[in-house]
Amino acid sequence: MRPISNEFDVVVLGGGPGGYAAALYGASAGLSVCVVEKEKVGGTCLHRGCVPAKEYLETASVYRTVLEASEFGISSPSPTYDFSVAQSRKQKVVDQLWRGLSGLMKGRGIAIVEASGRYEGNGMVSLSDGNTVHGESIILATGSVPRTFPGFEPDGRYVMTSDEFLALNELPQSVAVVGGGAIGCEFASMLCDMGAEVTIIEALPSILAGCDEDIADVVKRSFRKRGITIHTGTSVTAHQPDGDYTKLLFGDGQELRVNAIIVSVGRRPNTDAMLGSDASVELDARGFVKVDPYMRTSEQGVYAIGDIVNTAQLAHVGFAEAIVAIKTILGEYAVPVEYSSVPWCIYTNPEVAFAGLTENQARNMGYDILVKKDQFGGNSRARILGETQGMVKIVAERLSNGKAGKILGVHMVGPWVTEQLGQGYLAVNWEATPEEIGQFIQPHPTLSESFGETVLALTGRGLHIG
């Protein structure tokens, strides 16, 4: 769509979650907005990231459910899967969401320019088709791309990043996942559930290094029980292709023969070609845009949000940063994002969700703390579902009288915890106490009762937890 003019209140460079959220929020406030996006609005999250990955994980969940249906008295002998059908379904979901987003943006009068853009300075964005657009304010939101390293460049056959993996029509039967963070563990979990032989190789001492140790331990036990091999404190050195396989060399002379290697070692900011010579936007040594708490860059009138700033690379964080940027542009009161307590969700089997400080983080910050845990094994709904692995863990400040003060962190692992984190996130960010939260009634039987039970236990008068 070609804009009616080339003058706008706001020009957004990048149409991913941060960029389109800024456009929608700004347009709803009456600003004229142009979004410059070289591919399709929705960005990596919608087209090559969050949404496709979770659709595949849901495919794995359905397959796992059918395999275990006999426990519920349902006969389903020898189920099989056709991953090309899952790929088609994934694309249908993505296309429906993309069309809905495009229609929503156009309905709010947002001009969408399908071209590559570069910020030239002084409010001017040059386009790959030779035109330019100008904004009174500029929001940079060009997102990120998968990190790679020498010797493991993606070739689409032996070595893949998330981009290549999410485009497959057929799953490899043996896979090495290089990187045991959230994305790597999601891929490993899905592949294992679909019958692949999976090995995780992580350079750090543990997988899911950013999680509370108790939570990560549950995932590690589950992975090992399901046959996933985990090597930690280990780096890969090379791989040697050989027909349908490649030999992966890692650690101290160790070898592994696999069909594919998935490199999942994080993402880097997509800022290489974002700025022209007259732009005065400052980057750090790793290519991230430097911003203040209100998302303002070093150049007046220019803001940066999403994966190109050195904050949590999460779509919902990009949404929040977009709102802060637009409110600042409007001259409204804006509350900076509190990055230490944003919600995190990892869609492995079992799922992980958390907000706030881990137990170790709280201790290292000098807090005297109280900790309570509730295992899902005692939860009625979890028993009904047949998914009892996991727990809710809450970290609270210990007051001088020995009672629990504000809740510092909520950590969950188990069935559908990504859908249960909301009340925990609110508790952390409102600095609520267990006495306050404990007054609220949890419906029975539900998985969310475990949060309520754990909070109640922190008051010193738990029902099912001592």
Image: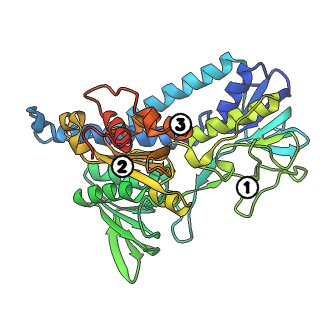
Compared across the picture, whether 75 is left or right of 245 comes to left
Confirm whether residue 39 shows in the render: no
Q: What residue is pinned by disc 3?
A: 46
Vertical placement of residue 435 versus 358, above or below: above
Choose top left, top right, bottom left or bottom right for residue 455: top left
Task: Please name which of the two marks, 3 or 2, marks the residue nearer to the observer.
Answer: 2
- Residue sitting at x 69%, y 50%: 309
Asked if residue 275 can be seen in this view, the reply is yes
Colour mapping = rainbow
Q: Specify the farthest residue to the front.
A: 401
The three-letter code of the residue at mark 2 reads: Lys
Q: Which residue is mark 2?
A: 372
Res 110 quadrant in image = top right
Question: What label sits on residue 235 in the rendered view?
Answer: none
Pointer 1 residue: 272
Q: Report the amino acid beneath label 1.
A: Asp
Residue 201, position as x, y percentages in the image: 40, 67
